[in-house]
Image (tube, rainbow, N blue to C red):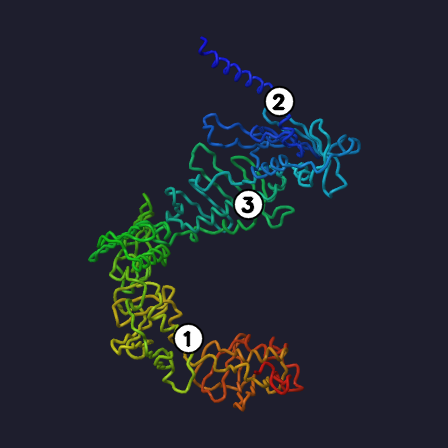
Amino acid sequence: MKKHAGTIVLVVLALALGVWLWLDRDRITEGERKSRENSAFVVWRRDELTRVSIAHEGETIVLERDRPAPDKPSNEGKEGQWRLTSPREERADPVAVDRLLTTLEFATALRKASGGAGLGFDAPRASGTVRMGGLEVPFALGGPSPRPEGTSYFRVGDETPVVVSKEVTDVLLAPSDTYRDRTVVPYLATDLQRVEVKHPGGGFALVRIDDHSFRIEESGILASRSGVDRVWAALAEMRAEAFPKDADAERLTAQPVATLKLVPRDSSKAPAELAIGEACPGHPADVVVLRKTPTRVAACAPQDLVGFLTGDAASLVDKHPFTLRVDEIEEVRLEHAGSEAIELARKGTGYHQRAPLDRELPEPEAEAATELLTRISVSEARSVTRGSSTGSAFVSTGRALVRNGPREEIVEVGAPFADGRATVRRLLDGALLDVDASVYRRLVPRGTMLRPRTLLEHETRRPTRVLLRCGVDQELVDRGEGFRLVSPAGYETDAAIGQLVDGLVKGKIDAWVADNDDGSFGFTRGPDGCHVVLAFEDGNAPVTVWFGAEAEGGIYMKTDARTGVLVAPRSLHVLAKDIYVSRGTLRTEAARIEHVKVTVLGRPVTPADPAKARDAVAALFAERVVSLKKLEGAPDLVIDVDVAEAGAPKRIACRTVSARLRECSLDGVSATFAVTAARLAPLLPASASDGGAPTDASAPTDAGAPTDGGRGAGTP
């Protein structure tokens, strides 16, 4: 017994301490007072909060916290939900409750109030209690304090009155609607089995297929993820901005703009029925939403949600072969009669090829694989019909499969028609998709599918000669100082030719889309077709690049250096058609400009700012070269530039072709340039640059008049 005496003493002491703490739980301890000596509330036990009541302006707001379910593990750390039990019974808005509790917990006593009379506590503006376990703390909000502005007198129990901030004042005087739950739709999207929307123009109904997909009830066709997402977005936005009177809500939803019926997956839960009506009283940017079941709630919700819910079933049809997006596809397998299957699986940031060979894809091919999956995931059909609506049986010649974890989606691919189109059957809903040739080619295996996205793979030779045959015939040669125009002769060369050469030799294409040219890609046979010839420093094996039709977001191209058809950015086609006469031909170096004179419609004018006019001439770069002919038609703008050091004067003549562009020529140069109106605006008077007529014809412009000993401003 003696050896257990110490243990017994410790147990007795622990029990005594426990009893003392239990008896002391309803009292404010000195430790609590000391730790909160500058706070409005001398005690605050956040974990023990169970009830808050606030009475003001004829209503009593009561917030009570539910006790956590007894079967929940204590280590989950989840507090019970707060409910509004007065003046109505419903779940409370957790954000508003947290704002109230946080404001009260950290409310600071700005200063103590002297005396008790005249502070407004005889008829407080608000009063209430805070219950923390067995401790109930009363409080009262008195009258306004004269300083600082917006503050109020406040008292907790029998403590000395203090002055609290405007924030505390506002939160205690907030109406009960502040704490009402803002949720109008009682179920999450993941909880729904069926969604029905009706409106005067029609409507639609969506029925769940699985955890990821819905079908359109009327047709049985898969609903697109983007369309379903729009519906979910509307439901998520259906949150109360305010709460109208019930009578107003009933009246304004009598002829609803739309009605909704939401059936949960859990059959034990009641469907939700909602009506969307007219504009909310006092809230013109909102509409009335009346939830009739499972509980009645009237709310003002953003009117933007109406647009998401007033579509029809046709707008929701999924035209994609697969629902999985590119970042969700982990595996793909393409099979077709007479071809080797291609199968890929993601591995880290790259890919492992399982068929036709088992290997890791090098980076250039992995990049091509990513582009392939991207194009597969964004592919769309021309039209989608029910599987049973066709008069003839569908015959599959191949299939395409994508997988994300356990989710597997398969489409069967039919033989192509004469124009390259094909029919694809989506097994998820049995729908038949009419797809273009470009989509068909993405779903059948081919040799160029994983080819690196470069036009001339492994080409390391330096291009030294370029022949352009896409409009104006041109020849450019690089003899070590950059490309220069050889034909047509006599022009300065534009440096943009380097962009075309680099784009063809080193640039990134979009994708290889076919193993061979079957005549459907828009290539013109023979020398009349748009093409570029590249010759190299070794004098061997020049390469010809051909341009076809614009499609698939770019331009079809091919080369005689290798088989296959590719899609490249349209910008390469634009560069191939450009005229490589220097776009800086019209400009004059600022240091050489002595005088600038401007004539509009035959009358000399003065620019709004002569100094800026001179700078404009020094920066007069064209957008492009229009032709290798002089300007046709009478000019409406003439710019005469006197050049220093006995240089020949320059005359630029321009005519307006649109509000944005003028076409200009320089005397002595057989070419017409397109110049933006913005570049020419500083040369005009303010009214003329805005499209008006010249306003000052009294004297010619002299933008570079000497100001320092006879030399033009800025002249060295």
Residue 168 position (above or below residue 627) = above
Q: Callout 1: 10 Å neighbours few (<14), some, many (20+)?
A: some
Q: Residues within 10 Å of mark 2 (few under 14, many from 20)?
A: some
Which residue is under mark 2?
26
Q: Residues within 10 Å of mark 3 (few under 14, many from 20)?
A: many
Q: Quadrant of residue 29?
A: top right
- Secondary element at image label 2: loop
Q: Which x, y percent locates residue 382?
A: 36, 59
Q: Amino acid at mark 2?
A: Asp
Q: Nearer the viewer, residue 595 or 303?
A: 595
At 69% from the left and 38% from the top, the residue drawn is 169
Q: Amino acid at mark 3?
A: Ile
Q: CA distance from mark 3 to mark 2?
A: 50 Å
Q: Earlier in the sequence, mark 3 or mark 2?
A: 2
Circle 1 sits on which residue?
496
Which one is in front, 221 or 588?
Answer: 588
Residue 577 visible, this angle: yes
Q: CA distance from mark 2 to mark 1?
A: 84 Å
> Could you say where residue 39 lies in the image, as x and y percent from the top left?
66, 34
Residue 396 visible from this viewpoint: no
Q: What residue occupies the far right of the structure in this picture?
A: 118
* SS at badge 1: loop
Quadrant for the C terminus, please: bottom right
**Measured along the vertical axis of the image, is residue 69 above or below residue 589?**
above
The quadrant of the rendering that contains the N terminus is top left
Secondary structure of residue under mark 3: strand
Where residue 440 sits in the image (x, y, percent)?
A: 30, 59
Residue at image mark 3: 276
Residue furthest to the top: 1
Task: Give the distance between the C-alpha atoms of the residues marked 3 and 1, in whole angstroms.
Answer: 58 Å
Closest to the camera, between mark 3 and mark 2, is 2
